[in-house]
Amino acid sequence: MADKNQNQYHPAEVNGYHRSDQESLEEIEEARRKKKMKWTIGIIAFIIFQTSPSFNMSFVAPIRVKNTNWGPFKYDASTVNFTYGDVQVGQATIPKAKANFKSTKKIDVLVTLNSGALPTSSNLGSELSSGVITLNSQGELKGKVTVMFMFKKTKISKMNCTIKISTSAKEVKSLHCS
C-alpha cells in the first residue's frame, strides 16, 4: 500500500527561494486586473472608432416651372423634400414667384442632404459601397392662373422624382420624374 506522504506533492525550492501563497495570489490578481484593463481599452477603442455609413452633400438644384397656360401663373412659396427610403434627408425651399404665360421660370435652389436622421438598420452602407445612392424628391406648387386677365383659376403642380447619385463621380446618374 502506498504511504500517505507519497500522495502529497511538494514542489522543490528553486535557488533557495520559496514562494508564499500570498505572493501567488497577488500575482494572479495583478494579471486579472491587466487583462480586464486591456479588454476595457479594446472595447472603448472599438466604440470610438466604429463608423456608421453616412453622407453629407450640398448641390444647386435647377428647378423649372413650365407654364403652358395663356395667362401668368403666380405660385406660393413651397418646399421640395428629399428622402432616402421613407426618411427625410434634406429639403429645398422654392420662393414665391410668377411664371409668365407660355414660358418657363428658372430657379436655382441650394439643397443640403444629410443622412444623420437615418436609422442604423438602413441599407445605406451597401449603397455607399456600391457607389450609387438612390433618393426620392417630392414637391408641390400651388398657385393661381389668370386667364384673359379676368378669370383666376387655382392650379396645383406635383412633382415626384427618383434620383440616382454616383458618390465616386459626384454626379447625377439618372433622374426620373412623374
Image (cartoon, helix red, strand yellow):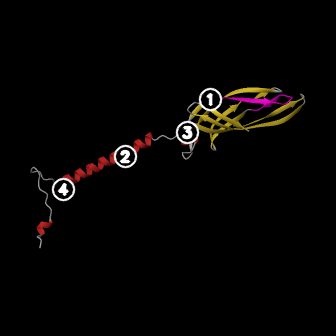
Report the residue that reaches farthest toward the bottom. Answer: 1
Q: CA distance from mark 1 to mark 2?
A: 43 Å
Instruction: Rate crowding at label 1 as few (under 14), some (14 to 19) or many (20 or more) other CA atoms within 10 Å.
Output: few
Asked if 142 appears above or below 11 in the picture, the reply is above
3D distance between C-alphas at marks 2 and 3: 35 Å
N-terminal-most mark, 1 or 2: 2
Q: Are marks 1 and 4 in contact (CB under 8 Å)?
A: no
The residue range painted magenta reads 58-76
Nearest to N terminus: mark 1 or mark 4: 4
Q: Which mark is residue 21?
A: 4
Residue at 14% x, 57% y: name it.
11
* Residue 66 on the magenta span: yes
CA gap, disc 2 to disc 4? 29 Å
Q: Which mark sits nearer the N-terminus, 2 or 4?
A: 4
Instruction: Please tell me in which quadrant of the rendered image residue 162 appears.
Output: top right
Task: Answer left or right for 31 relative to 89.
Answer: left
The answer for how far apart the CA atoms under marks 1 and 4 are is 71 Å
Q: Tell which tag, 3 or 1, sits nearer the viewer.
A: 3
**Which amino acid is tagged 3?**
Ser
User: Residue drawn at (62%, 29%), measured in percent from left and top?
Assistant: 59
| Residue 96 % position (x, y) | 75, 29
Can residue 166 be seen in this snapshot? Answer: yes
Q: Residues within 10 Å of mark 3 (few under 14, many from 20)?
A: few
Residues at circles 1 and 2 in contact by the CB criterion of under 8 Å = no
* 6 within the magenta span: no
Q: Position of residue 177 (x, y in %)?
A: 71, 37
Image position, residue 15 (x, y; %): 10, 49
Question: Which residue in the protein does label 3 denote?
Answer: 130
Mark 2, residue position: 40
What is the C-alpha distance between the residues marked 4 and 3?
61 Å
Residue where numbered disc 1 is placed: 59
Residue 95 shows in this picture: no
